[in-house]
Image (cartoon, grey):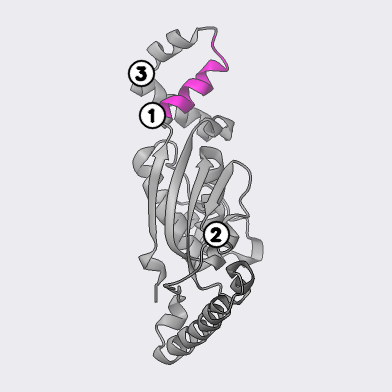
Amino acid sequence: MSTYSQMHVEILSHTPDPERVVALAARLCYSPLSGEQLKAALTPEKVESLLEKVLGMGHFSVLEHVSFTFLIEGISRVTTHQLVRHRIGCSYSQKSQRYVRETEPEFVVPPKIEKDPVKSEEFLKTCREAFSTYCDLVDRGVHQEEARYLLPQALESKIVVTMNGRALHHFFSLRCCTRAQGEIRTMARKMLKLVKEKAPLLFETAGAACERGPCPEGDKSCGRWRKKGEVNGNH
C-alpha cells in the first residue's frame, strides 16, 4: 500500500543557468548588441530586473527556452492519465503495462479511504483480487498487453516528464489549485518546490491562479483568493 505522501519526485536535469537564459532571450528582442555583448552586460542584478519586468508583464514566451526533466515514482495511473493531458511544451515516457509484466504490485490508496481501516481493507482486497486474476491469465498464456485490462487504476506507476518553463507555470496554475484532485496536487506542489530551488526568480509567482490574481473557477472557487484580498487590503 502507498499513499500520496510517499510518492517520489526529483529533477533529473534542467537547462543550465535557466534564469540567465530567459533574461538573455528577453533582452535580445529589444537590443542591437551581439550575443557576446549581451552575455557580458547581463549582471545578476540586470537578470533579476529583466525577469521581474518580463514576468510581471505576462510575457511568458521566453520561458519556453528552458526546460526541467522530472522522475516521478509511486503515483497511480489515475494521476498519470491526468498528467498527460498537458500536451503543449511537455514530453512523457511512462512504464509500459504492455511490455512490462507486473509482478510486485503496490496500490495507491486515497487518504479518505486509507484513514478508514474497513474501507482501506476492502479497497486493497478488490485491487489484489483483480491483480491475482491478471497474473492467472498471464500464467495461462494471455499476453500482458491484454491481461492488463484488469489492472486497477490504483496500481503504482512511474514516469519521466519534461516541461518547459511556460508549460510548468500553466501546469502549476491548474494543478496546485485546491480544486485539483489530491494526488496530482501533491505531485504538482512537490515539483513546484523543486523548480523554485533551481530558479526562484522564474517561479516566484508560480502556483494556483489565485497566487497572482482572482480565481478563474467562478462559483466553484474555494474562496481563498477573496481571503487573500482581504488580508492584503484589497476589496
What's the mark number on residue 171?
none
Residue 3 position in % (x across, y down): 40, 72
Labels 2 & 1 near each other (Cβ < 8 A): no
Instruction: Calculate the distance from the C-alpha at mark 2 to the C-alpha at mark 1.
Output: 33 Å
What's the mark number on residue 96?
2
What's the mark number on residue 17?
1
Q: Is residue 49 left or right of residue 234?
A: left
Residue 115 position in % (x across, y down): 39, 83
In this view, 151 is above or below 30:
below
Identity of the residue drawn at 45% across and 59% down: 187
Three-letter amino acid code of the residue under disc 2: Ser
In this view, 39 is above or below 149:
above
Q: Which region of the structure is painted magenta?
A: 19-31
Three-letter amino acid code of the residue under disc 1: Asp
Q: Residues within 10 Å of mark 1 (few under 14, many from 20)?
A: few
Report the label total.
3
